[in-house]
Each structure stands twice: as C-alpha cells, then as structure tokens.
C-alpha cells in the first residue's frame, strides 16, 4: 500500500515506523528538513520537505496513486486543507486527520466531515483519546497502565509490585498451578529499566513492573493476587482545565456513582469557561502547585489526583506535591517519554502517554482485517497485537508449544468464537481464532511473518 504521512513529529514518526516496517510504501512530508532527514535516515521511508497542504508538495509525495493519507501535523487547519486537496485534486480514497481543537469536534458540526463538505474519513482527537485513557486509569487506580482488548473482554494491566505482594519470589509456573482457574497471565516484566518476556520458571520481585492480561471478570481477583486490592474512588482532583481535564470532569459527572470532583485551573478565563460547562464539579482558579490551593481542593484526602496540564514538568511536580500532601493516587500526563523513568523514583503511581495513545488510535483505524488492534508499551519498548489467525499462517493448526515464537513474544489470550481461552502449551490455534500477543519491539517483524499479516484498508 502507498501511504503518505503528513507531519514528522513524534506521532507521525511512530506511525511511519510501524507502517514502513510492514513493507508499505511510505512517504513522510514535513516543512522541517531536519525532521525529514531524521525519518529517512532511521526508517525505510521517502521524505518530502514542504507544506503538506500545498498541491505541488502532495504531488511530489506521490498523492496521485496513494491509497491513504494521514494528516498529523501540529495544525488542525493544515490537516483539514491537506485532506481536502488530497480528495479534490488527487482522489486519494482514504483520509485520516488529527484535529485537536474542541471547536471542530462538537456533535452539532458532525456533518462537516462529509465528501461534499470536508472529505475526512476518520477524525482523531488526541485530547479525547487521552481523556479516555485517563478515565481508564481511574477505573483501575492501582495500576500504572491499562488498556482493553477483544471487545472489552480482556484488559492489559500494568502493576508495580510492592514489598507486601503475596506473589513475590514464586515461579510463574507455580503461580499458574496455584490459581488454575484465574484467567490471567504475566506477559511482560520491567526490572531495573529493562523490559522482557518472562519464562515459566522466572520469579517476581519487589519493584518489578509487570504487564498482565486478565479476563474482565477476573481483574479484581488478579489485582488482589498481586497485592493491589480494589480501591473505591469518591474524591478526585483534576489539575488543568484544558480539553483533557474538562473532558474527564464532564465524563465523571455522567457516572451513576456520585464522585466529588474538583478542578484546578491557573488561567482565569479558562477556569470560567470550564465552570460554565460543568454542573457538579467545583472549579478553582489558581496555581496547581500551590500548597494552599491544594489544601482548598481537598487534595490531602483525595482518592486520586490527575495532573493533565500542557506542561510535563508541571504535571510531575503537581503529582509529587499531591502525594506528599496525602493523596492516595497520582496520575500524570507525560508527553516526553524520557521522563517516564522518573515516575517510580518520584512515587507517581501512573502516567498517560499521549503519543502512544494517539498512535494506537490511528493505527486502529488504519489496520483492517487480520490486525484488529495494536497498543504501544512504554517508549516503544513493546507492542500488544490483536490479530486473527489466517488459514495459511504458519501458526494455524498448531499448538502454542510447537510455534517457534522469539523469546520476547508471549500469547496472552485466545478468543475462539465468543469464548476467551487462557493460553496453555497445548492450546491449538485454529483458523479464525483471535490471538492477543505481547512482543518486544525487536521481535514484531517475526510475529508479523508468523501471522502472515498484511495491511488492508477500508
């Protein structure tokens, strides 16, 4: 497939890395020559320097025979015009645009994105996706990462093991025997900064960060086994009333359980804007790093604090101050992946990575057919791939023990029809089965070969 990606920033670069690695013909456009050089040096892509909305630049990038264009520049307007030009002049069949401004996303304007108006097939809102990710974190407050798969039937849980975890120093094989009815499996362990796929004989130790696939109905039991009893949340403080913070507050107000939420915003005009759009949430105007304001917002007794301003350092400092004040849980929005390593040291319970969230969402819309979903873990350290087994795939008709997966790959769940199966060595993968795979980034190409995955488009 011939794909044009407009924007070589963090999101565009990651999408280009994923799609070019699957033998697609990828061209990247950006008006920053240095970003284009970085992309062409590191990836198997072609690069064009210029403004993506200009017809001559799109023509140079090969838009006349492109199958898909992904507009992910920093400007909403450039992304919209790019899709319009790609449609009107080059008849590109599929167009995806990243739009950040909430003004473009109001439901009453949904008719804007049609062939006769603005021909955008899929609109991706990073803020909304991040808000959804924040709500997922709040739904599993004792985890540092959470994502759902297989239509919501399976959850990936990131769990930090404490000294009192009952599963410490026990081989994973023995844990599996002790809890034979538990539909959960440990697929990844990060120890002293290194992520690996564990062997059955490996043990877990305090301060390990583990990734576990669990059936939705077994999530509570899984958390208890790994020393994370369910936490009830009644009081939540949100720092930052931007698009993300406001969306989270609005979603919390719609929940049937009466959550008492307080929202802190430094900019007075934005605070007033948020207050006008919220009914039950208390909005406070002031600095989220102020000890006095945190006290007024009842942060010392909060069940969770969510720091989602536009500044990573503010989010980190606000989370640290909130935990020191007595908050039970702190979640920070972190754009810079190099700062993630500080989370454990600073006692920040969880983080949200907008780049990984946006990339996963875009790829979810791009991929169709055999690849159903993808989720990037950490700083592109590993991927979770949800895919359907083909009849011609090397894994079809074979048991898991007979499949030559690389060391960094584990199967976390298998869906046979409507039934979710916990994978075992004698589990046979049949044509049509949906499998959930954890793979270190270096092993993803081999996984794709075993699945014989090809990228199709709507």
Image (cartoon, rainbow, N blue to C red):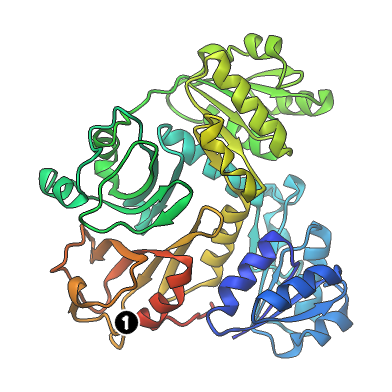
Residue 106 at what x, y percent from top left?
A: 69, 47
Label 1 neighbour load within 10 Å: few <14, some 14-19, many 20+: many
* Of the pair 56 and 401, the residue shown nearer to us: 401
Q: Residue at x 70, y 50 (%)?
A: 105
Q: Quadrant of the N terminus?
A: bottom right
Count of labels in the image: 1
Residue 90 at what x, y percent from top left?
A: 77, 85
Vertical relation: 434 (above or below) 295: below
Q: Residue at x 65, y 51 (%)?
A: 126
Q: In the figure, is residue 58 to the left or right of 182?
A: right
> Which residue position is annotated with label 1?
390
Q: In the figure, is residue 139 to the left or right of 109?
A: left
* Of the pair 194 and 351, the residue shown nearer to us: 194
Residue 337 appears in the rendering: yes
Residue 17 at what x, y percent from top left?
A: 60, 72
Residue 196 at what x, y percent from top left?
A: 39, 57
Furthest residue in direction front, as rendered: 192
């Amino acid at each position: 497939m011939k794909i044009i990606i407009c924007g070589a920033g963090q999101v565009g670069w990651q999408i280009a890395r994923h799609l070019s690695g699957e033998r697609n013909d990828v061209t990247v456009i950006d008006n920053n020559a240095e970003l284009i050089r970085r992309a062409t040096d590191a990836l198997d892509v072609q690069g064009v320097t210029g403004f993506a909305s200009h017809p001559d630049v799109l023509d140079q990038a090969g838009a006349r025979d492109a199958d898909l264009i992904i507009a992910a520049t920093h400007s909403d307007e450039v992304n919209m015009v790019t899709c319009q030009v790609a449609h009107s002049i080059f008849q590109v069949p599929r167009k995806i645009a990243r739009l950040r401004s909430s003004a473009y996303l109001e439901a009453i304007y949904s008719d804007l994105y049609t062939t006769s108006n603005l021909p955008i097939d899929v609109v991706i809102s990073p803020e909304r996706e991040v808000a959804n990710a924040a709500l997922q974190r709040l739904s599993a407050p004792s985890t540092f990462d959470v994502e759902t798969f297989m239509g919501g039937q399976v959850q990936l849980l990131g769990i930090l093991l404490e000294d009192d975890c009952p599963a410490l120093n026990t081989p994973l094989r023995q844990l599996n025997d002790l809890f034979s009815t538990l539909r959960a499996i440990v697929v990844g362990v990060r120890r002293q900064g290194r992520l690996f796929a564990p062997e059955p004989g490996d043990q877990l130790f305090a301060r390990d960060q583990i990734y576990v696939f669990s059936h939705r109905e077994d999530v509570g039991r899984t958390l208890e086994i790994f020393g994370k009893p369910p936490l009830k949340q009644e009081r939540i403080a949100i720092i930052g009333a931007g698009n993300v913070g406001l969306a989270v507050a609005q979603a919390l107000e719609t929940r049937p359980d009466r959550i008492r939420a307080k929202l802190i915003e430094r900019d007075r005009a934005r605070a007033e804007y948020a207050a006008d759009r919220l009914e039950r949430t208390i909005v406070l105007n002031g600095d989220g790093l102020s000890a006095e304001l945190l006290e007024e917002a009842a942060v010392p007794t909060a069940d969770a604090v969510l720091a989602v301003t536009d500044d990573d350092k503010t989010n980190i400092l606000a989370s640290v101050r909130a935990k020191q004040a007595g908050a039970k849980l702190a979640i920070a929005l972190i754009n810079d992946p190099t700062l993630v390593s500080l989370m454990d040291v600073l006692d920040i319970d969880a983080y949200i990575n907008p780049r990984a969230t946006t990339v996963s969402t875009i790829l979810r819309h791009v991929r169709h057919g055999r690849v159903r979903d993808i989720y990037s873990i950490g700083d592109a350290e590993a991927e979770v791939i949800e895919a359907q087994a083909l009849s011609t795939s090397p894994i079809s008709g074979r048991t898991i023990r007979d499949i030559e997966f690389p060391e960094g790959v584990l199967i976390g769940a298998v869906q046979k029809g409507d039934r979710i199966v916990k994978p075992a060595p004698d589990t046979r993968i049949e044509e049509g089965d949906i499998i959930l795979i954890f793979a270190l980034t270096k092993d993803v190409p081999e996984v794709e070969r075993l699945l014989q995955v090809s990228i199709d488009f709507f």
